[in-house]
Image (tube, grey):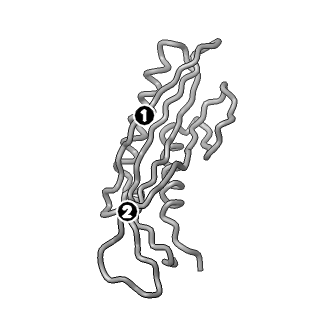
């Protein structure tokens, strides 16, 4: 039997949602060396840390469940003319935030079904023949890690 990995389930669903925001982009995971002329979305898994134990009975044979917080980032990159790049990036940002905040499958993977926060975003623009633009949106997901739980 496979072990349950909520972290991987959250990341896989997040990548699906990011791709659905604009289905003309190529979706990748943890790749940074992509051509500048390509329109893409990349999910970076990010860090995670334990923020507390789940109260209750403890088993002598099983590690206690812990609340984990992970902080992945979704980055969109595209090339547009100068007057449109910022508007296009902001449109992708808000569509992604809305999709993540309202996705029941993703919410069900988090603590008490509401463990998702938008952590922030950052933009970058580079001038060449056109303006290359990018925006990264970071999220924090709180979920329960049960080390020995099998599906």
The residue lying at 49 percent from left, 47 percent from top is 72
Assign a secondary structure to mark 2.
loop
Image coordinates of residue 101 in percent, x first then y, are 35, 48
Q: Nearer the viewer, residue 20 or 29?
A: 29
Would you name the residue on which mark 1 appears?
121
Task: Mark 2 vs mark 1: give the one in front.
Answer: 1
Q: Quadrant of residue 87?
A: top left
Q: Earlier in the sequence, mark 2 or mark 1?
A: 2
Looking at the image, is 92 positioned above or below residue 130? Answer: below
Give residue 108's mark.
2
Q: CA distance from mark 2 to mark 1?
A: 24 Å
Q: Residue at x 50, y 78 (%)?
A: 148
For label 1, the SS is strand
Please say if 18 is above or below 60. above
Q: Quadrant of the N terminus?
A: bottom right
Q: Between 30 and 58, which is closer to the camera in this rendering? A: 58
In front of the other: 27 or 4: 4
Position of 125 compared to 100: left or right? Answer: right
């Amino acid at each position: 039997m496979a072990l349950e990995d909520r972290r991987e389930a959250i990341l896989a669903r997040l990548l699906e949602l990011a791709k659905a925001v604009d289905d003309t982009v190529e979706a990748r995971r943890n790749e940074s060396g992509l051509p500048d002329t390509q329109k893409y979305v990349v999910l970076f898994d990010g860090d995670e840390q334990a923020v507390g134990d789940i109260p209750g009975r403890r088993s002598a044979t099983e590690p206690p469940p812990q609340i984990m917080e992970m902080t992945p980032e979704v980055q969109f990159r595209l090339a547009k003319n100068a007057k449109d790049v910022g508007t296009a990036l902001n449109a992708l940002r808000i569509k992604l935030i809305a999709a993540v905040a309202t996705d029941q499958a993703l919410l069900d993977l988090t603590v008490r079904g509401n463990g998702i926060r938008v952590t922030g975003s950052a933009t970058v623009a580079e001038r060449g023949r056109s303006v290359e633009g990018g925006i990264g949106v970071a999220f924090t997901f709180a979920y329960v890690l049960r080390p020995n739980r099998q599906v």
